[in-house]
Amino acid sequence: MINIYEVNETNNMIEHEKLDVRTITMGISLLDCGGSSLDEVNERIYRKITTLAKNLVAVGREIERDFGIPIVNKRISVTPIALVGGSVCERPEDFVTIAQTLDRAAKEVGVNFIGGYSALVSKGMTQADKNLILSIPEALAKTERVCSSVNVGSTKTGLNMDAVSLMGEIVSETAKATADQDSLGCAKLVVFCNAPDDNPFMAGAFHGVTEADAVINVGVSGPGVVKVALESARGANFEVLCETIKRTAFKITRVGQLVAQEASKRLGVPFGIIDLSLAPTPAVGDSVAEILEEIGLERVGAPGTTAALAMLNDQVKKGGVMASSYVGGLSGAFIPVSEDQGMIDAVGAGALTIEKLEAMTCVCSVGLDMIAIPGDTKPSTIAGIIADEAAIGMVNQKTTAVRLIPVIGKGVGETAQFGGLLGYAPIMPVNPFSCEKFVTRGGRIPAPIHSFKN
């Protein structure tokens, strides 16, 4: 039973420490939306999404009102579109029409984003996969709410370097296609290794083929709550510090569990997972960087940063799994640069570089996230950064991802503005030396030896 002390404590977290449910995401399978023509497939996709998700936003608002818990985003994820449209999409332009259908459906039901304009190519690409990937720049330029992801590797299959090389080109072309918006399209494009199929967080969400016809996943976040809790542990040893983080994560996850169960019941859709992720926002006091600095770093990026982040990530997961039997997705700490004021300040102070961020991704929940780089960065350099990050995921049996934004027309020292939860970002320098001969060799980097478990 929840007692009055816990009720008051949760209210204080919401009112003063920026606790929120970051998203309710309805996953929808589109595997039954095939048809004999592109028009028929588009119609079936639109009808299924608008039917199943018609009450999603209204129910989210009801839960906010009834429980006093802010729910920042209501979102949808769908089956990877390369699988859904493969039989009727003969050209990249055909896939763009499906992206526009997804965008129209998202606007109709009122969600913030719809994810799943995706292809899973960790071992090889079908022609449908390749056509979808080639369509991404145009699709993201012609839509507002569609998010795209491509999985280019896994621990079991190795890295598809043909796909990695191609994604370097696609990120670059997407930047050019949305150059008038500081290359915003790239903020809606994630390149994964070991992508989970139950992820409610954009831009990498899609509805996995092993999922039910529809499911409710909830992403909960509370970096501000963790920071305030740690203020009471200043000067304490690591045992006290870890216990404080773990207990706070437990309380945050309980809030998510409550919202998930209510949303599931009211919508008549099965509950899937809680994703407990310390996902920051540009708001002051809602920063993962500030948590790390509260632990004892002068600035994020200082020596000790990776160790502090590893500890934080582990304790968040431990607290979460005690609160819910269905913790999944990307649970842990996110380190997106543009969405975290502390990260932005650390870049400005010269404490944080892309190379240090890459080291941090070995122990955090996702990867190189929302990093703005010079607009004239070569596609092969982007591919090399993707390959490095994917290799970390492959070897360490964890999800890693890259969301790089080459901002057309801007260079180091300038700033890109994305708006809303996406925030703003200083343009960070990249290593100028070429890796083109490496990323264009073709073929696959084999799976690591420890992948062979059966």
Image (cartoon, rainbow, N blue to C red):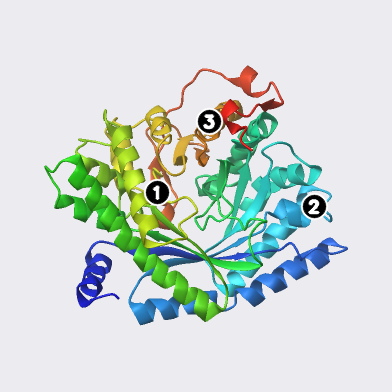
What amino acid does circle 1 point to? Answer: Gly
Neighbour tally class for label 1: few under 14, some 14-19, many 20 plus, Cα within 10 Å: many
In the image, what residue occupies the spot 54% across and 47% down? 180
Residue situated furthest left in the rendering = 235
Report the disc number at residue 332: 1
The span from disc 2 to disc 3 (Cα, nearest Å) is 31 Å
What amino acid does circle 2 point to? Answer: Gly
In the image, what residue occupies the spot 40% across and 30% down? 359
For mark 1, give the secondary structure: strand
Q: Which residue is tagged 3?
A: 395
Using the image, determine if residue 317 lies above or below residue 113.
above
Q: Which residue is tagged 2?
A: 86
Q: Is residue 239 visible?
A: yes
The span from disc 2 to disc 1 (Cα, nearest Å) is 34 Å
Q: Earlier in the sequence, mark 2 or mark 1?
A: 2
Q: Is residue 412 left or right of residue 293?
A: right
Contact between labelled residues 1 and 2, with CB atoms less than 8 Å apart: no
Residue situated furthest right in the rendering = 36
Neighbour tally class for label 3: few under 14, some 14-19, many 20 plus, Cα within 10 Å: some
For mark 2, give the secondary structure: loop
Residue 143: x percent and y percent?
Answer: 62, 58
What amino acid does circle 3 point to? Answer: Val
Residue 22: x percent and y percent?
Answer: 41, 62
Q: Is residue 391 left or right of residue 313?
A: right
Q: Earlier in the sequence, mark 1 or mark 3?
A: 1
Q: Quadrant of residue 23?
A: bottom left
In the image, what residue occupies the spot 69% across and 41% down? 121
